[in-house]
Image (spheres, grey):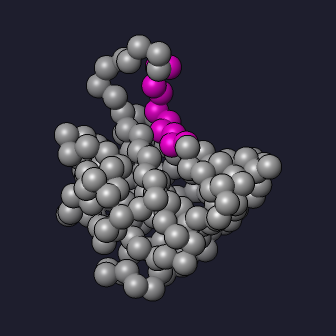
């Protein structure tokens, strides 16, 4: 993995002045970015996540997404699959992660997200699940795919239970044909 400094990108059309960092997925490579959720923004409305047009995470899990949200965006090339992992620098910090796909020319940012192509989320589970590996302090989302067309992916790194500070590494793995 090689670390890349991320660039600040303000997305036009956003309702608020949220910081969004640009990522550049590299086919068949892992790319790492560092950040701190203290640079993020507080989202008071999480209802976009359990809206049936997004289906990112259920309302019963909203407490796991109540910290500051720091956003990253890039384009998944066609014929590719992306996996994103957040690794907190301090393993005791409880982070959550979500990522959604939208059209490549769209700049929709939560909470102003009427619909998306796909949304995946990961957070700390309260109990073990049969068939799932035990969880550690990392969070991973996968199944972000682009088949015939590229898609924009927006990644949200956030804290659980109101966590509003903590350094992390974001690892973006892209597999392409």
Q: Residue at x 67, y 60 (%)?
A: 148
Q: Residue at x 52, y 49 (%)?
A: 168
Q: Position of residue 31 (x, y in %)?
A: 70, 53
Visible in this render: residue 172? no
Visible in this render: residue 6? yes
Q: Residue at x 34, y 56 (%)?
A: 54
Q: Image height check: is 104 above or below 164?
A: below
Residue furthest front as drawn: 148
Magenta part of the protein: which range?
133-142
Q: Image height check: is 71 above or below 118?
A: below
Q: Is residue 72 left or right of residue 4?
A: left
Q: Position of residue 110 (x, y in %)?
A: 34, 67
Q: Position of residue 47 (x, y in %)?
A: 21, 58
Q: Position of residue 68 (x, y in %)?
A: 33, 59
Tell whether position 137 is magenta: yes
The residue closer to the viewer here, 5 or 43, is 43
Tell whether position 98 is magenta: no
Tell me which secondary structure the magenta stretch mostly adopts.
Answer: loop
The residue closer to the viewer here, 147 or 96, is 147
Q: Is residue 104 left or right of residue 119?
A: right
Q: How many marks?
A: 0
Q: Residue at x 29, y 25 (%)?
A: 126
């Amino acid at each position: 993995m090689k670390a890349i400094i991320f660039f600040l990108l303000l997305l036009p059309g956003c309702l608020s002045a949220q910081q969004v960092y640009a990522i550049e997925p590299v086919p068949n490579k892992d790319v790492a970015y560092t950040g701190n959720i203290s640079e993020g923004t507080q989202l008071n409305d999480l209802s976009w996540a359990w809206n049936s047009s997004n289906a990112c995470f259920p309302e019963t899990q909203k407490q796991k997404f109540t910290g500051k949200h720091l956003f990253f965006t890039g384009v998944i090339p066609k014929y590719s699959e992306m996996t994103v992992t957040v690794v907190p620098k301090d393993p005791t910090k409880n982070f959550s992660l979500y990522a959604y796909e939208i059209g490549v020319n769209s700049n929709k940012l939560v909470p102003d997200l009427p619909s998306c192509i796909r949304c995946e989320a990961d957070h700390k589970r309260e109990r073990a699940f049969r068939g799932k590996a035990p969880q550690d302090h990392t969070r991973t989302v996968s199944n972000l795919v682009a088949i015939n067309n590229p898609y924009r992916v927006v990644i949200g790194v956030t804290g659980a239970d109101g966590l509003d500070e903590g350094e992390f590494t974001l690892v973006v793995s892209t597999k392409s044909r």
